[in-house]
Amino acid sequence: MIGGGLLGLEAANGLLKQGMRVTVVHLLDSLMERQLDKAAAKLLKRSLEQRGINFLMEAQTEAILGQERVEAVCFKDGSELSADLVVMAVGIRPNIELARQVGLHCERGVVVTDTLQTFDPRVYAVGECVQHRGTTYGLVAPLFEQAKVCANHLAKHGIARYEGSLTSTKLKVTGIDLFSAGDFSGDDSTEELLLQDPARGIYKKVVVKDNRIQGAVMYGDTLDGTWYFELMRDGTDISELRENLLFGQAHLGDSGHGPEKRVAAMADTAEICGCNGVCKGDIVKAIGDKKLFTLEEVRAHTKASSSCGSCTGLVEALLAHTVGGDYSAAPHRKPLCGCTEHSHDEVRAALVANELKTMAAVRAFLEWKTPDGCPKCRTALNYYLLCAWPGEYQDDSQSRYINERAHANIQKDATYSVIPRMWGGGTTPDELRAIADAADKFKVKTVHVTGGQRIALYGLKKEELPKIWADLGARGLVSGHAYGKALRTVKTCVGKEWCRFGTQDSTQMGIDLEKMTWGSWTPHKFKMAASGCPRNCAEATIKDFGVVCVDSGYELHVGGNGGVKVRATDFLCAVKTPDQVLEYCAAFMQLYRENAHYLERTAPWIERVGLAYVKGCIVDDEAQRQALAARFRFSQQFSQDDPWEARVKGEDRHEFTPILQVV
Amino acid sequence: MQQAETMAVAAEEWIEVGRLEDIPRQGARVVRCAQGDIAVFRTVDDEVFALRDRCPHKGGPLSQGIVHGKRVACPLHDWKIHLDSGLAVAPDEGCAARFPVRVEGHRVWLSLKEVAT
């Protein structure tokens, strides 16, 4: 076997399995030098030797000898090795002869620009023959990305650019786990995080620059390869993760996901996507049968990871495991949706900088590919415009999901649920009577207490909504926004008014917080809680913003989540007075509103931007905190109208009535 | 609340549903029939389509979805349905029944006789 690269080693292993005696001849002193550092290459070599493969390193092949058929290989130092079969896998060399003859500029490959044009702009080139920004690719995923951009230009859309592909490599040799991605060699400006456990045969190296992953090499335990690759691709700030980075995602404390990550060892019948009941076998089969290469394709064909998204890591790991080196995750700069090349951040920055105040203006300015967008971008743009131009932007109800358009939650049978607000989780006999009367009158099928200390009525027809809202409203109950990407609830305990352990009036704190924040639209739902003492009965440490009262004041916590992935909050700071709690809360919400991507909860947002950034804006910078809080309060004056009352009075009447009834 | 108009009609007849402006652009309204609801959609370009108000996936009310281009996204599980054919956008498979619909002046007319496929 001539060549100790990825394909050479896979082929050598294949020949070995056929019962042949195999020697791998490699030019350099280290295997897979483009993918592995020396330490990992050494482990790989040892493990392949244990399987029975021989190695001849630093050997330059001079000639292949034989008369009728091959008999031996001769090396530059004069030595010979007898052979019945010689297989060459010495890398891909672009075949540039034709291109050179017609006068196109070539180096190692046909040189192309970001639009995949050669030096003759009439001629495009994609694939293994091209050299883009000094790099040639031998994998299929970059080819797909190039082809997409090329097709875009051939179709005269002319907006896409190819900026190179990040690729990762896995060796497809059973029993050998190997992963590499990015720049793993590092230099003076980088740091290396290293974990070596020779007894278990584990080696992990992550190269970091400015708290961003540049590359990774893993041997023996590669489960977190896709995770490192994601962090690298997204340019995630890993300062908060450093402590546990090398131990893997399972050690981050997001309980319930650790052991399941071992996809390779999972049975085909193991359920991967709990929302849609998709098993490992289904996904592996679809990847093979339908030739799927990307997460999006797997989602479309199998529905796995297309609902709550918590199994995305598993599906990506399966994809990487199944298609090996051909897998490349989506480009690191994710477009907002299929209608545009621009990312969430770019769109937001553009609409503020250029004072774009309608959806049509944004789409025209940023050259949207579709005339009226898609559900993803319309809902996002509607929110971004609403956030950027409070009081000016006219909310577009046709660009809201049904729940926000109807101000109720749609259920599986197309009926709706109604959840009135209960300030700080408190209620009164009169409110309970009002709810009971409404439940009787509208023959509500289910009355249920929610997780946010409120009461939900289920099974209402859409036409009935304004009628039940009228009844509830007449007795002082208003919309609870339980249907919105908005402030939901502020859960409280009874605090020092009743509890023998209570240190502050957490109930009033919760009511004040809810009075200040209700009605606000946020990138995703936003939940709060206030607990009267560190026993934390209101579970404030799994909320987006949590207050834990202590004897000396109030501890503020942010970025918690009790849903898909449990995440305990980060401690933001401690303050002395209820007014300070309100100011910090307003500032935090506004920072989240202005900075997070649409449909991004505070937990992943904080993990993306880093707690240090949030603290820098809110705790360390008083002026910025006050400015954020002021912007929040300004925006609130336009959003604190009860939407139920407005609809009782006739707003959006068409929404709640059939256009015609035919007998 | 304003009551919807009620009228008696034979299956093949064209019935006047209402004015084009009564249907929100990029939205839909429901025509309630004994055989089940029909969703009448209006696109951004004022094209009008009518489909049985049931997603072929799990019966979600398509009239409540987001209309974009000539498609609607089902509000329950986000299947996309072509308004002109009633077919689910690939790779999903399924079809919602179509009904003939036409716009004359500003009036929208609907036939309750399903288009044969």
Image: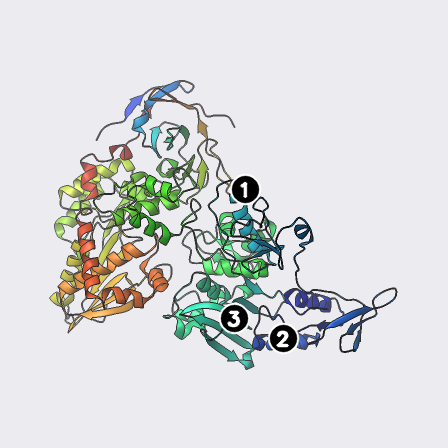
**Which of A663/B4 is in front?**
B4
Residue A568 x/y as whole percent: 32, 67
**Residue at point 58% right, 50% down?**
A118
Pointer 2 residue: A30
The residues tagged by marks 1 and 3 sit, at their Cα atoms, a distance apart of 36 Å
Q: How far apart, in angstroms, are the residues tagged by discs 3 and 2?
A: 15 Å
Task: Tell me the crowding category of disc 2: few under 14, some 14 to 19, or many 20 or more residues within 10 angstroms, Cα based.
Answer: many
Quadrant where the image shows the C terminus of chain A = top left
Are there few (<14), some (14-19), or many (20+) residues within 10 Å of tag 3? many
Residue at which label 3 appears = A184
Label 1, on which residue?
A154
Q: Single out the mark in the foreground, 2 or 1.
A: 1
- Left or right of A265 on screen, residue B50: left
Task: Find residue A333 and name its label.
Answer: none
| Left or right for A464, reference A62 | left
- The residue under label 1 is which amino acid type? Leu
Specify the quadrant of the image occupied by residue A358.
top left
Residue at mark 1 shares a chain with residue at mark 3: yes
What residue is drawn where x is 15% and y is 58%? A512
Name which of mark 2 and mark 1 comes first in the sequence: 2
